[in-house]
Amino acid sequence: MEDKKWWKQAVIYQIYPRSFQDSNHDGIGDLKGIIRRLDYLSLLGVDAIWLSPVYRSPQDDNGYDISDYRDIDPMFGTIEDMEALIEEAGKRNIRIIMDLVLNHSSDEHSWFQEAKKSRENPYHDYYVWRDGTPQDTPNDMQSVFGGSAWEWVPEVGQYYFHQFSVKQPDLNWENEKVRRELYNIILWWMEKGLGGFRLDTADQIAKDPDLRVTNNGPRLHEFIQEMSRETFQKADLVTVGEAWGADIERAKIYSNPDGSEFSMVFQFEHMLLDQQEGKGKWDLAPLPFLRFKEVLNRWQTELFECGWNSLFWNNHDLPRIVSRWGDEGRYRIESAKMLATLLYGMQGTPYIYQGEELGMTNVEYDIEEYRDIETLHMYRERMEKGYTRQEIMHSIYAKSRDNARTPMQWNEEENAGFTEGMPWMKVNPNYTEINAKQQIKDEDSIYHYYRRLMALRQEYHVFSDDRFQLYLPEDENIFAYSRKNDIRTLLVICNFYGG
Ligand code: TEU
Ligand code: CA
């Protein structure tokens, strides 16, 4: 008898709390706002909600910089609001998945405040320090958001290592005490009755800056197995690790059906195809369609029965799929439905990112309207390097993380019904045409298409269980495949002509 994990049949909806629904008119989404919208999610048919971080945080990276892992940021509400959300969602059979940011903390976390006081401080070794001189960094490693990955602290006469912003010092996983602290935090949250966790930058925790290693460090799987054993495995949870550096062989280890690590990972091979070879996300290239098919085919085929895929086009870091690989103009509705069909016909656990079910699109704002730390860093860096403003804005329109972070479009009222205050980020002006209220009324809308597709997935096991087969691998326009068992065949044919 094949093991039947609940999350193999489940649909997971990602909420970016600051952009979902404001309840107290401060222009920022919050937990009470989410509670207000649970019926909307229940009608869509989701089984779980993954919340981007709502812990206490200085918000340097919108909550991915945590200063207290056991508290909710006042901007989002209180611990009681969080408990109310878990309970209210539970009444609708929706589980709550929290985001665990364990690669780094905020520099305002009390551990770091202590750590930087002296080398003898008991918390010093919670972070990754190296010797150097104020002029001479330990090496020339760069942070993901630009600039050196090393920051000098005069009090201790050392540099600390940060893979992300300077306000996100890397935690030292080599230190057993750190691992123990983190596991206790996970256990503390598990007691609140969560449905699972999404592990931020899961493949970067076992870094070794001396070897210039960030992803896939030598002790990575040892740490993840220990964490899983000490925490997740004590309950029936779904766990998904974010792993930009995962190839198929690693994904099999991460999502081993024996449950020794995670339920699944987010891998990004298909998401990295529309950029220039050997360069980064901002250096745009058209989507190479045949490779795109080859990549998705390979993941579907090779994880079959020995691992598990996550199915996603979008998250809070990625541009809107209908703008990216669909047609956000004339065929917006058709292409949004097609992209949904292509993805959710495959094997794996489907994820929907807020607004994806409405076919929300990318934005083109003036640079002053952008809020994302990564976008703003890149803008400054490339201006200094002499790129033209036009070139830079072209990349931002296509790839900025803020494309995903504009407020949710609920209705045609002011600020799209997101807030009655001043929204923290400008609402996409197309909210008068693209909004939830109007789509709920229209049986032919993208929203109802998602709803029906999710219902189909839950009804027919061929979606979760059966083998994937690609057809016409060399066709430049058609993406076709089947899923098949003894009783039925599911045939998916998508026409990308003109895309
Ligand atoms: O993302 C990890 C990560 O590597 C991203 O910075 C990614 O390279 C970038 O978003 C691509 O545009 C996670 C979170 O999802 C992201 O929001 C955080 O900023 C980051 O970790 C740091 O916590
Ligand atoms: Ca608010």
Image (cartoon, rainbow, N blue to C red):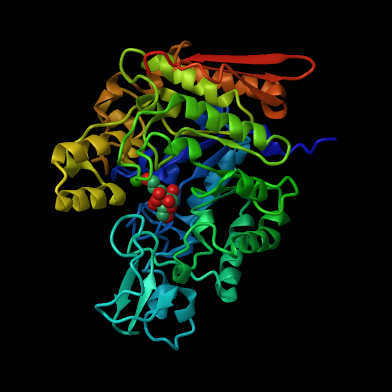
Residue nearest the viewer, comparing 33 with 453: 453
Q: Position of residue 275 (x, y in %)?
A: 36, 37
Q: Is residue 406 visible?
A: no
Q: Is 154 left or right of 6, judged from the image as shown?
A: left
Q: Position of residue 358 (x, y in %)?
A: 41, 23
Q: Is residue 373 visible?
A: yes
Residue nearest the viewer, comparing 313 with 186: 313
Q: Quadrant of the C terminus?
A: top left
Q: Is residue 220 above or below residue 334?
A: below
**Residue located at (26% from left, 37% from top):** 395
Q: Is 346 left or right of 334, judged from the image as shown?
A: right
**Quarter of the image where one finds residue 455:** top right
Q: Position of residue 223 (x, y in %)?
A: 62, 63
**Residue located at (60% from left, 66% from top):** 184
> Farthest right residue?
1
Q: Is residue 228 above or below residue 278?
A: below
Q: Position of residue 490 (x, y in %)?
A: 66, 15
**What is the tally of numbered marks visible in this picture?**
0
Residue nearest the viewer, comparing 489 with 385: 385
Q: Quadrant of the N terminus?
A: top right
Q: Is residue 10 above or below residue 412?
A: below
**Residue located at (60% from left, 43% from top):** 248
Q: Is 395 left or right of 453, judged from the image as shown?
A: left
